[in-house]
Image (cartoon, helix red, strand yellow):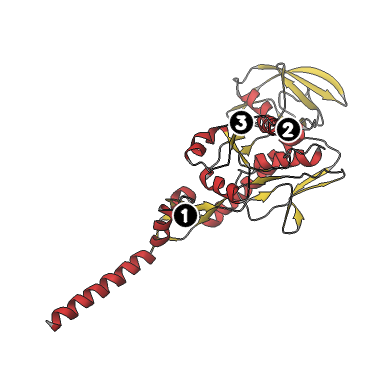
Amino acid sequence: MRRRGVTVLLGALVTTLLSIGVLAAPIPYVVLGPGPTVDTLGTSDGAEVIQVTGRETSTSAGQLRLTTVGVQPEVKLVSAIAGWFSDDEAVVPRELIYPPGQTEQQIEQRNADDFAASQTSAETAALRELGYPVQVTVKTVAADGPSAAVFRPGDVLTSVDGQQLTTAGGLTEAIRGKPAGTVFTVGYQRDGAPGTATVTSQDKDGRPRIGVEIEQKQPHPFQLKIDLEDIGGPSAGLMFALGIIDKLQPEDLTGGRIIAGTGTIDDAGRVGPIGGIAQKLVGAKQAGAKVFMVPADNCAEALRNPQPGLPLLKVATLDDALDALATLRAGGEPPHC
């Protein structure tokens, strides 16, 4: 009888130790949770997030807060179980965040690059909204290309076949959208004087080209800098663009509210979808946000993960976001998800 009792006791101890080992073992999942939020109109680590030199800026009574997702990269079963039962967290396969064949350092660098690109696009979109148009400028002309006798370095290309050029990418898309040998009518300015010219595209390296290297410029009489570290990815673009506009115009976009949001933005001001909307809504609610700006393509997911008392404003463009904020300031109801 004593031997049987010892056997049962040892069996229970082994089972317990095995259970502890299993619970403490790492598993191929990560836990996503609410990350920090940052007021793009405020400061971070003692420095203004959006810095303007050479021009006076305005101050706002409210806030424009970008939102982020926190990632717990090393997960043990006990943490995953807690995450599965949490309303604020999500447990997802590790490969969705850290694709096979890429190191964490490579992924962090890609996120940093995406974050820098989002800042550039936010600046471009915001300055366009404020009346500083993009200029598509000829940087070099290929001596043996179809534009050799047509354009010069410094020419500003303004249109293709009657369509205004608003980004450098617009010219590339127009040329590549038709087969080599197509004749294009290109509007341009040289030393401030307007002109038009025709140029026939040629096949070069398997793609139609017109033999010019272009660069995108956006002249403005002041300097802009976004100073924010330890955040990656492209999803802060919308809130950066709104922050720039708020600082550079007298009107307070916030109307005294704490406005949170997310969304990528391109040079033309189009707002794109992002990941982690559920966790970003939680972070916004915790930061005291009164409304949340949601990319139109994320509305369905946002509606499945609502935060009580946090209305969801649907935006597809920067203009949509500005119109929504204006409607709020006027006491109206902007479009919701």
Which amino acid does the dot numbered 3 rest on?
Ala
Q: Is residue 315 left or right of residue 252?
A: left
- Asked which secondary structure carries label 1, the reply is strand
Front residue of this view, candidates 325 and 203: 325
Q: Estimate the x, y position of residue 17 in percent, counting from the top left.
A: 31, 72
Mark count:
3
User: Could you tell me which residue is drawn at 52 percent across and 45 percent down?
Assistant: 276
Residue 214's label in the rendered image is 2
One can see residue 193 in this view: yes
- Asked which secondary structure carries label 3, the reply is loop
Nearest-to-viewer mark from 2 and 1: 1
Mark 3 crowdedness (10 Å alpha carbons): few <14, some 14-19, many ≥20: some
Residue 31's label in the rendered image is 1
User: Could you tell me which residue is drawn at 65 percent across and 23 percent down?
Assistant: 174
Q: Is residue 190 left or right of residue 124?
A: right
Residue 316's label in the rendered image is 3
- Distance between the Cα atoms at labels 3 and 2? 29 Å
Q: Quadrant of the C terminus?
A: top right
- Asked which secondary structure carries label 2, the reply is strand
Q: Earlier in the sequence, mark 3 or mark 1?
A: 1
Q: Estimate the x, y position of residue 43 in percent, counting from the top left.
A: 74, 53
Q: Earlier in the sequence, mark 2 or mark 1?
A: 1
Front residue of this view, candidates 21 and 304: 304
